[in-house]
Amino acid sequence: MSVLTVNAGSSSLKWSVVDPPETLASGTVQRVTDHAAALRGVLDEAPLDALEVVAHRVVHGGERYSAPVRITDAVLDSIRDLSVLAPLHNPVNADGIEVAMEALPDVPHVAVFDTAFHATLPPRAHTYAVPRAWNVRRYGFHGTSHAYVSREAARLLGRDPEEVDVIVLHLGNGASASAVSKGRSIDTSMGLTPLEGLVMGTRSGDVDPALILHLRRTLNLSTDEIDKVLNSRSGLLALAGDNDMREVHRRIEAGDAAAELALDVYCYRIRKYVGAYLAALGGADAIAFTAGVGENDAIVRERSLSGLERLGIDLDPERNCAGGPVISSDASTVRVLVVPTDEELEMATQAVALVR
Ligand code: ADP
């Protein structure tokens, strides 16, 4: 029996066929303009015999969804309704679901939400100090990855997830940190939308909210223009001229001071969140780096965590360069880990658990 996972992003379509824990096939269609056509192509190509369930990644589950759910017409409607909170993601996710349900009507389809793992955030962590009538809160994203990586971190420590406190640093194109206490997310850096928190490839992460008012007043920018700049033209791209961390390093090596500052800002933001989450958790058993930058970039890991020996964090330079899984010294009371994420496997596992 196998699971087809579908991750319809703004310009790409990632898919895999998984028989948990085995991945049987996978692929990515890049530069997608027509998601329906791309998905039909995938359905032709993917080995779909013995298909048991289709698992769809959905970015925003709002207040309603704190766990995977079998997709009905009503569920699909509410995924579309949540587009107001994730305009770049939920409409595309919903389109993908529609096409797949039409093409594969005989198997159950399950939505797995990026926000779901963070549904356990206590009120003090998810409440913004603004009028209640606005009905806004922190949701958090990348939940599938934070769930998988925090569990894998516990496994690497030889402990149950219920016994350990882990800080997960998901550093990809989008980036977020989470504090996971005994298997439950208790805080995370992304907020109402995926814009808050760490410095990302093209997103600013944390800024003074008054920045937006300032831009409206001084540059007369529209809401959509500000949205676009903060989401698509900020972060590493704004500071270094490129959103790919590998290119940032190349520019630093060529003596580019702007790229050097970009790396410094990026790593300093990570360091501050690590400090915050060590305090939130009252100390951690492990810090786990994951996703494109987290899994591959020894320089970012070193810059983010160097000099924190007084907090029990002591990286081993050789282990860090070798890429883990353990990259802290034997003296480090907090174990620092590199844990490759596998969102497709996690989606498949959750979908199977729901339908069986
Ligand atoms: P996404 O967030 O789109 O799923 P990934 O988790 O794959 O993406 O992360 C993509 C990013 O990872 C790239 O934009 C690049 O900046 C970074 N990256 C990939 N490989 C490396 C590497 N070897 N060293 C540093 N950064 C890397």
Image (cartoon, rainbow, N blue to C red):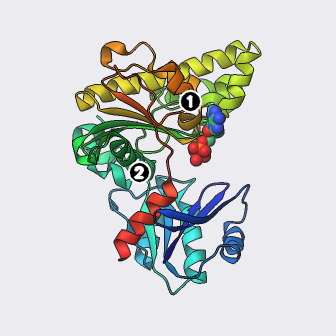
State whether residue 42 appears in this view: yes
In the picture, the quarter occupied by the C terminus is bottom left
On the image, which quarter does residue 291 sit in?
top right
Residue 276 image point, x, y percent: 33, 26
On the image, which quarter does residue 31 sit in?
bottom right
For image coordinates 41% across by 72% down, the residue present is 75
What crowding class fits label 1: few (fewer than 14 Cα within 10 Å), some (14-19), or many (20 or more)? few
Circle 2 is placed at which residue position? 148
Question: Disc 1 vs disc 2: Cβ atoms closer than 8 Å?
Answer: no
Residue 210 image point, x, y percent: 46, 26
- Quadrant of the image where one finds ligand 1: top right
Residue 197 image point, x, y percent: 45, 33
Q: Earlier in the sequence, mark 1 or mark 2?
A: 2
Amino acid type of the residue tagged 1 in the rendering: Ala
Residue 91 image point, x, y percent: 56, 62
Up/down of 56 relative to 203, above or below: below
For image coordinates 55% across by 41% down, the residue present is 174
Circle 1 is placed at which residue position? 322
Amino acid type of the residue tagged 2 in the rendering: Tyr
Q: Nearer the viewer, residue 5 or 173?
A: 5
User: Disc 1 on helix, strand or loop?
Assistant: helix
Asked if residue 159 lies left or right of residue 23, the reply is left
Which of discs 1 and 2 lies nearer the camera? The answer is 1
What crowding class fits label 2: few (fewer than 14 Cα within 10 Å), some (14-19), or many (20 or more)? some
User: Disc 2 on helix, strand or loop?
Assistant: helix
Q: Residue furthest bottom?
A: 106
For image coordinates 45% across by 49% down, the residue present is 145
On the image, which quarter does residue 15 sit in?
bottom right
